[in-house]
Amino acid sequence: MNTRFPFTRRAISALTHSGNGKATEYSDATLVGLKLEVSRTGRKVWYFRYTFNKIKSAIRIGEFPAIDLEEARSTAYKHRAEVDRGFNPAAERRAKREEMTFSEYANQVYVPYAKDRKSSVKDDISKLDLWILPAFGTSKLSSITRQEISTYHGKIKQSHTPATANRHLALIKRMLGLAIEWDYLENNAAHGIKLFKEENCRETFLSAEEASRLFAAMHGDRNPVACAALKIMLLTGVRRQEALSALWSHVDFAAKTWLLPKTKGKKPRHVLLSDAALQCFREQRARATGSQFVFPGRDPDKPLCDPKKTLKRLLAAAGIDKPFRIHDTRHSFASLLVMSGTPLFTVQRLLGHASASTTERYAHLASDHLRTSVETIGQLIV
């Protein structure tokens, strides 16, 4: 494959990844230093590469087609002229950007970027607004130290959980990593900070009897849509957002399946529907609101926001006194399956876990079923 040729808009539009490495870089034969990097996903980014004082450097110009060929060449010519005059354009850029505070970088650069690429951007914004920006917002990007981040990591562990602290650290590390990629920063102060061990010991789930009581409490509740959403979560083990964003066009009553186009693993998957789950969907469809959403909110053009208050009311009505959260419906689904003798591999597939290690947290619940199997072997031999 020839990676050096005179760039034309038509030619670069047709460029693809070569299949080797994380990205394929193409060089413009018309302008020395102008490069176009094509990732495995097809993302195309312009760069200007040059040598200054015998040190190779690169400046990110922007993405194609947002930055077209003409603009990319114009920017590259400008940087080439700076190099010829004895100025390092990357150094000039960094000198200006080092003055940016973490808050400015977060709100002006990172959040707009994340909104276009992350389905969980609301979680990032929440962490930033409530915790991270109050701690680092006024600090210059280059002034934040590893010790400060490590101390923050520890404080979040004390006020929340090790897992939550690790999610905060991961967000900070990702943001600083992107700042380096975009020439806002030289070093990632979060690099090398060790994650806390996540015990994941909090496993709240309903017994079959408690789940039946919860279902019984749903009859006559003032919010049937929220009740139906919670019932589907218990019957299928899907995550809250997967349930609340369900569309009627994704439910196949004939095939008894439900398509989840967006999952945590970023891969679509089909959920197998039991007769009880299908009946729940049918009852919800009978309420016909004309909405595309299976569980619409007060505004039928928007999905139900959060059935948290309904769950709290139902738990009280069912006499269930335990710290049961919406996500615990997923734990309950998995736990009841394991305790009924369903193999962990099957539970993994039903939950959509990419790794078996995630499902292993339920392994201890299979002890009674495994003990029965062991006793069977003993009876056969002795």
Image (cartoon, rainbow, N blue to C red):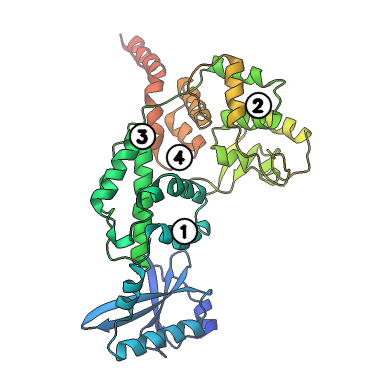
Answer with mark 1 or mark 4, whichever residue precedes in sequence. 1
Residue 361: percent from left, percent from top: 38, 30
Kind of residue indicated by mark 1: Asn
Spatial CA span between label 3 and label 2: 40 Å
Which residue does the numbered mark 3 point to in the structure image? 159
The Cα–Cα distance between marks 4 and 3, rounded to whole angstroms, is 29 Å
- Residue 165: which quarter of the image? top left
Q: Earlier in the sequence, mark 2 or mark 4?
A: 2
Q: Position of residue 314 (x, y in %)?
A: 61, 21
Give the residue number, with chain letter if any, for mark 1.
107
**135 versus 112 height, above or below:** above
* Whether label 4 touches label 3, CB < 8 Å: no
Query: What type is the residue that disc 2 sits on?
Result: Ala
Q: Label 1: few (<14), some or many (≥20) within 10 Å?
A: some
Identify the element where label 1 is drawn. Answer: helix
Quadrant where the C terminus sits is top left
The span from disc 1 to disc 2 (Cα, nearest Å) is: 46 Å
Q: Measured along the vertical axis of the image, is residue 88 above or below residue 332? A: below
Q: Earlier in the sequence, mark 3 or mark 2?
A: 3
